[in-house]
């Protein structure tokens, strides 16, 4: 037993994403809480505010970004730069977008083992011609697996947003994500907690709030992780409709949703500045 040594992770690589000012990992311990939806709408919101913004889909096994932006059938082109091929991200709603879903066949990525998936993803990050960006949001896969750890460890400047829904089960999984980020081998600062589906607001009664998944989960996790509750997004039909059809929520007549995303965006801007 005395010969047993803890395997230390590779040094964080400072050169990864050197042209990007702020890298934000949108993560959660749990699937289906709305990470991709938050990452996409936050990216659009930051771009609307005039920030140069990119969005990377790190969910290699279940990429959602091509659907969220309705760009499934688009293929990024490559450009030669100093004898090296650079991939030009797809641009939509002012956001530079890259996803493994745009580069590979679904059935190919599905059979990659963890290290292969992480390696490929890192290659895509390096090969993409992001240009100068104020923000790169990374839509993380659910949980605390290989890809999540690699992204958090290897992108030195990354900060995290943890998305949860108000239920205790989601809080418990969000806590696990918090543990991953605060682990001494990872050390990714948590910018804040986003409580998604915080309440239900019916379209015809925009001022009403029904706490169908309970109340206070977001604040509870924020207190536990000593991070702010940085935004609360209501459960509304239009968010689901626009995400599934790749439309821009800011082009729909939903002032209360715009307000929720704008507040979230402003709080994040305050935190990073
Ligand atoms: N606030 C909301 N109101 C209504 N529907 C929502 C809201 N947030 C997310 N959804 C819907 O919930 C579903 C799951 O969201 P999403 O895919 O963003 O979750 P995820 O955490 O990224 O999931 P996964 O873990 O599979 O990557 C989607 O159909 C999305 O449109
Ligand atoms: Mg997702």
Image: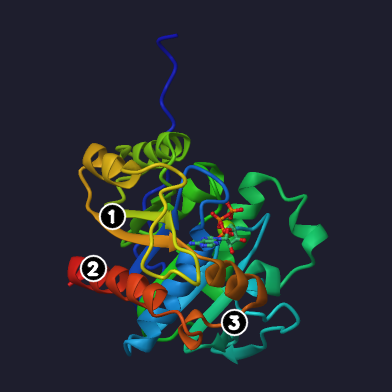
**Quadrant of the rendering where the C terminus is positioned:** bottom left
Q: CA distance from mark 2 to mark 3?
A: 24 Å
**Disc 3 element:** loop
**Disc 2 element:** helix
Mark number displayed over residue 192: 1
Q: Which residue is situated farthest in the front direction here?
A: 205
For label 2, the residue is: 267
Mark number displayed over residue 145: none
Please tell me which residue is depicted at 48% across the width and 42% down the height of the picture: 29
Tell me: 150 left or right of 220: right
Please tell me which residue is depicted at 59% across the width and 71% down the height of the picture: 243
Residue 59, percent from left and from top: 60, 58
Check whether the beta carbons of the residues at disc 2 and disc 1 lie within 8 A of each other. yes
Location of residue 128 by image quarter: bottom right
Disc on the earlier residue, 2 or 3 = 3
Location of residue 127 by image quarter: bottom right
Ligand 1 within 8 angstroms of badge 3 C-beta? no
For label 3, the residue is: 247
Using the image as rendered, state which of residue 106 and residue 233 is in the foreground.
233
Disc on the earlier residue, 2 or 1 = 1
Q: Residues within 10 Å of mark 1 (few under 14, many from 20)?
A: many
Residue 209, percent from left and from top: 38, 58
Ligand 1 within 8 angstroms of badge 1 C-beta? no
């Amino acid at each position: 037993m005395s010969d047993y040594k803890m395997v230390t992770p590779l040094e964080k690589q400072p050169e990864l994403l050197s042209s990007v000012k702020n890298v934000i990992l949108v993560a959660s311990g749990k699937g289906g809480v709305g990470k991709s939806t938050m990452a996409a709408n936050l990216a659009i919101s930051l771009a609307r505010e005039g920030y140069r913004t990119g969005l990377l889909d790190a969910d290699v096994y279940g990429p959602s970004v091509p659907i969220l932006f309705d760009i499934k059938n688009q293929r990024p082109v490559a450009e030669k730069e100093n004898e090296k091929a650079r991939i030009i991200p797809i641009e939509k709603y002012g956001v530079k977008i890259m996803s493994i879903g745009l580069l590979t066949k679904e059935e190919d990525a599905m059979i990659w083992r963890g290290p292969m998936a992480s390696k490929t993803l890192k290659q895509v990050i390096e090969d993409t011609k992001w240009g100068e960006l104020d923000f790169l949001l990374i839509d993380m896969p659910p949980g605390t697996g290989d890809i999540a750890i690699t992204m958090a460890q290897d992108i030195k400047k990354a900060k995290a947003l943890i998305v949860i829904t108000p239920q205790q089960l989601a809080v418990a999984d969000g806590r696990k994500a918090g543990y991953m980020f605060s682990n001494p081998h990872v050390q990714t600062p948590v910018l804040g907690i986003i409580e998604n589906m915080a309440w239900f607001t019916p379209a015809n009664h925009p001022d009403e709030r029904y706490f169908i998944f309970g109340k206070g989960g977001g604040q509870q996790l924020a207190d536990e992780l000593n991070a702010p509750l940085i935004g609360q997004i209501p459960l509304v039909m239009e968010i689901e409709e626009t995400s599934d059809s790749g439309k821009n929520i800011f082009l729909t007549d939903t002032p209360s949703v715009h307000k929720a995303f704008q507040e979230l965006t402003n709080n994040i801007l305050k935190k990073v500045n």
